[in-house]
Image (cartoon, grey):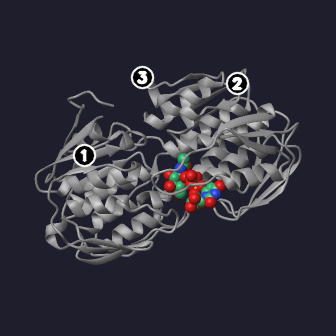
Amino acid sequence: MDKFVVRGGNPLLGTIKVSGAKNSALPCMAAAILTEDEVILENIPQVRDIETERKLLESMGAEVELGYGRAQHRTHIQCAILSDPVAKYEIVKTMRASSLVLGPLIARTGIARVAMPGGCAIGGRPIDLHIKGLEAMGAKITQDHGYLEARTDRLKGAHIVFDKITVTGTEDLLMAAVLADGETLFENCAREPEVTDLAALLTAMGAKIEGAGTSTIRVQGVAKLHGARHRINPDRIEAGTFLIAGAITGGDLNVDCCDPSHLGSLLSKLEQCGVRLDVGKDAIRVRSEGAASGQLKAVNISTEEYPGFPTDMQAQFMALATQADGASTITENIFENRFMHVQELNRMGANITVQGRTATVRGRTPLESAAVMCSDLRASASLVLAALVADGESILDRVYHMDRGYERIEEKLRGVGAQIRRMGDVFGKK
Ligand code: UD1
C-alpha cells in the first residue's frame, strides 16, 4: 500500500490546476449506457474511481478508451451491445457510485442486475430512494444473493418526490426517465453542479430535460438517444482543497481551471476566516499570512446540500480550523459517522471534540508530524492539509483512498512547493 511522506512548513506558491470533476464524470460515463452510439467525454480525471467505472462498463460489454495521454483527457465510450447488464459485486464493493448504472441499464435493456453496495466508512448510505423511484416508473425489483434485479418492458413516466435530497439518486433516476414513456416530474431534486453537468450531456444526446439545477426537474421521455461530445465540469472539491492548502500554509496560490460559481459557500466561509481571495472567471487566487500571524479566525460551518456548504469539504475545512484562532463548530448534516479524521487530527496535536453531529475545534494549536491513517477520500485530504503545516515529517498510510478522487495530488502539490512524496510499501503488501 502506498504512503505519502509529507514534510510541513512550506508556503504554497504559484499556480495549481484543477482536474475534471470525478462526481460529474461518473454519472456521465454511466449515461453512455443509454445509447448504442459513441459518447466522447473530455476532461475526465485520472483517478481510481474512473478506472473502476471503466472496468464496470467493460464487464457489461462496453468499449471504453480512457484517453489520458490525449489532449483534454478525451475518453470514448461505446455501448453498442450490452451483453451482460450486471454490475458485479467485485466491482461495486469498491465504489458505491456503481449504483449509478441501475437507471440507465434498465432504461436501455429492460433489465439490470446490480450488486447491493455494502456499508461504507462514512455511514450506511442506502439506495432505497433509487429503488422507490424506479418502482414508481413501473420497474419490478427483486433481491437475491446480495443482488438487486430490476425488470420492465419499458419504464413509464411518473411523479417522483424524493423523501430526502440525494445526488446520485437524482442522477440515476434522471437517466432512467430520459428513455421512459411519457413525462416524469421530479421534486426535491439535488441541485448540485454535477446533476446539471449530467443533464447537459443527456440533452446533447437528445434527451428532453427542464429544470436541472433546481429542485424540480421535468423530463419528456424519448424513444432513443444518440451519441454526443461533452466536457466535464472542473472539480469543485479539488479546487476547494487547493484553496485551503494555500490558506493553511500561508501561501499565495492561484487555483486555475476551476469554476468559482460552484464554490460560493466555501468562498464566503474562507473570507470570514480571514483568507484573502481574488476571484476571477476560471481561477481564484488565495493569499494568507498563515496561522502564526493570527490572521485566521474561527468560523462555524454546517454541511448542507448544494448550494450549502459541501459535506465533501468538511474534513478539509476542519484542518484549516485547527489553525484559526478561537473555537469553530463544524456540524455534519448529510452523513452520519463522517468524523473519522478527527482522531487522526488530534493525534497531530489538534484539539477537537465531537458531540453527536457537531465537532468543536479549539484553535489555534500547532500541529506536529505523526504517522496517520487515511480512512476515506476526503478525510485523507484533510490529513494531507494538516501535514503541510505540521512540524516535521508525517507519514500518511492508505493513500489509496486519496487516489480514488484526486488526480496526481502529490505531483500537483510538489509543483507549488510542497514537500510530499509517494512511497510504495517496502514489503510490497496490498
Ligand atoms: C454524492 C457524492 C458524494 C457526496 C454526496 C453528498 C458522488 C459519486 N458522490 O454521494 O461525494 O458526499 O453526494 O453531497 O456524486 N440517502 C438515502 N437513500 C438513498 C440515497 C441517499 O437515505 O437512496 C441518504 C444518504 O444516506 C445521505 C443522504 O441521503 O445521508 C445524501 O446522500 P447522497 O446525496 O445520495 O450521496 P451520494 O449521491 O451517495
Q: CA distance from mark 1 to mark 2?
A: 39 Å
**In the displayed image of the protein, which residue is found farthest to the front?**
145
Q: How far across and how far down the image is residue 17, in percent?
A: 35, 43
Pointer 3: residues within 10 angstroms few (<14), some, or many (20+)?
Answer: few
Q: Which mark is residue 360?
A: none
Residue in the foreground of this view, choosing between 322 and 231 = 322
Q: Of the residues under marks 1 and 3, which one precedes in the sequence? A: 3
Check disc 1 and give the amino acid type: Leu
Q: Is residue 123 above or below residue 201?
A: below
Q: CA distance from mark 1 to mark 3?
A: 29 Å
Tell me if label 1 and label 3 are in contact, CB under 8 Å: no
Q: How far across and how far down the image is residue 407, in percent?
A: 38, 38
In the rendered view of the protein, which quadrant contains the N terminus? top left
Residue in the foreground of this view, choosing between 411 and 18 = 411
- In this figure, which residue is indicated by the disc labeled 1? 396
Can you tell which of label 2 and label 3 is closer to the viewer? 2
Q: Which mark is residue 69?
A: 3
In the rendered view of the protein, which quadrant contains the C terminus? top left
Q: Of the residues under marks 2 and 3, which one precedes in the sequence? A: 3
The residue depicted at 88 percent of the width and 43 percent of the height is 181
Ligand 1 shows up in the quarter that is bottom right
**In the displayed image of the protein, which residue is found farthest to the left?**
392
The residue depicted at 27 percent of the width and 54 percent of the height is 385
**Element type at marker 2?**
loop
Q: Of the residues under marks 1 and 2, which one precedes in the sequence? A: 2
- In this figure, which residue is indicated by the disc labeled 2? 84
Check disc 3 and give the amino acid type: Gly
Q: Quadrant of residue 312?
A: bottom left
Q: How far across and how far down the image is residue 217, in percent?
A: 74, 57
